[in-house]
Image (tube, rainbow, N blue to C red):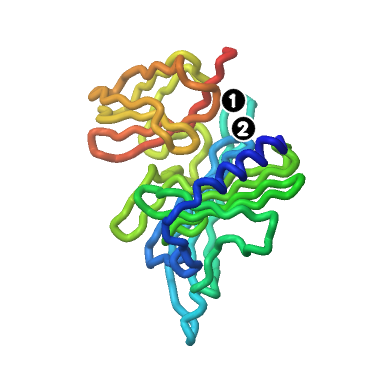
Amino acid sequence: MKNILTFTALFLATILHSQTILTVGEIFNFNFNDEFHSMNDYPPGPPNAIRMKVIAKHFSANNDTVFYSRSFNNYHSVFNPNPSPHLDYYFNIYIDSVFYTNLTDSVLCNSMDTSCVSIVNTTICGVPTNGVSYLWPEIYNAMIYGKGLGVVRDVYVEDGSPEYSYDHKIFYFKKDTIECGIPDLITSISSNIASEGSATVYPSPFKDYVRIKWDKKIKNAALLDITGTIKQSIHPNSNEFVIYTSDLKDGFYILQITDESNQVHQRKLIRANNL
């Protein structure tokens, strides 16, 4: 694992180019109603999301510090095998405050810090990104920052052990006139009930296919993985249809349905190959 991390750090160091180095003020330049969805996906686990929206902003008297108020609607889920395999969801809604100072400073490495390797990435949905990675004998940490997006990825690996590792990354943002990714629309509902409407979905867990029967005609149906990536998409224009899934990996998926009234519904599903 150490050799892999050393190679990664050296490779990242070689991609430094003439792209503009972002300042703290540019990176954490949020506006009212900016929205960001992120998740922890290493070690692999059930669906989870941190969903944050900016609700207030002001500067200090000398404009070297910016203050934000933020609202959160987060959740995580836990696999529960009884009485039948399903996910239990836990939600957390709150408001907090945060500030960023020294706004004209760069977030990149101090030249005297030998454990730090500066990197500059390309873009995320056209938005410039900068990154910093740190490499110690037993620990690797990388922070990727986006202009006006804050921290878009934070990777931490300790001694190659999943128990002491995480990968936190943004998968959706809405900022001014820019929208990127697929928003997480899961609401505070019980594990086996769709957000609206009623459905028969079987088999559950599924393997080679999943059959859906809805109480309304369906315009569009999509099967998303836990990162929000669409894995299958069909336009059945009926209230009963089949999605074939033999090429999917085992894990947790979200069935997202748009009905004839343009309302969006969701259902949590599990794929298991050893059925």
Label 2 or label 1, whichever comes before in sequence order = 2
Residue 256 position, x and y percent, is: 38, 33
- At a point 50% along the width and 35% down the height, the residue shown is 226
Q: Secondary structure at mark 1?
A: loop
Residue 201, numbered label = none
For image coordinates 60% across by 50% down, the residue present is: 142
- Who's the residue at 36% across and 35% down the image? 197
Q: Say which quarter of the image contains residue 76.
A: top right
Residue pictured at 51% horizontal, 77% vertical? 65
What kind of element bears circle 2? strand
- Taking the image as shown, residue 186 lies to the left or right of residue 163, namely left
Which corner quadrant holds the N terminus?
A: top right
What is the quadrant of the C terminus in the image?
Answer: top right
Q: Position of residue 126 (x, y in %)?
A: 35, 50
Identify the image quadrant of residue 237: top left
162 sits to left or right of 63? right
Give the crowd class for mark 2: few <14, some 14-19, many >=20 residues within 10 Å.
some
**Label of residue 85 in the image:** 1
Which percent across, then down, holds residue 204? 51, 20
Q: Amino acid at mark 2?
A: Phe
User: Front-most of 228 and 73?
Assistant: 228
Task: In the rendered view, tell whether residue 27 sits above or below residue 204.
Answer: below
For the residues labelled 2 and 1, the Cα–Cα distance comes to 7 Å
Are discs 2 and 1 less than 8 Å apart at CB? yes
**Residue type marked 1:** Pro
The image position of residue 272, as x and y in percent, is: 56, 19
Find disc 2 in the rendering and name its residue: 79
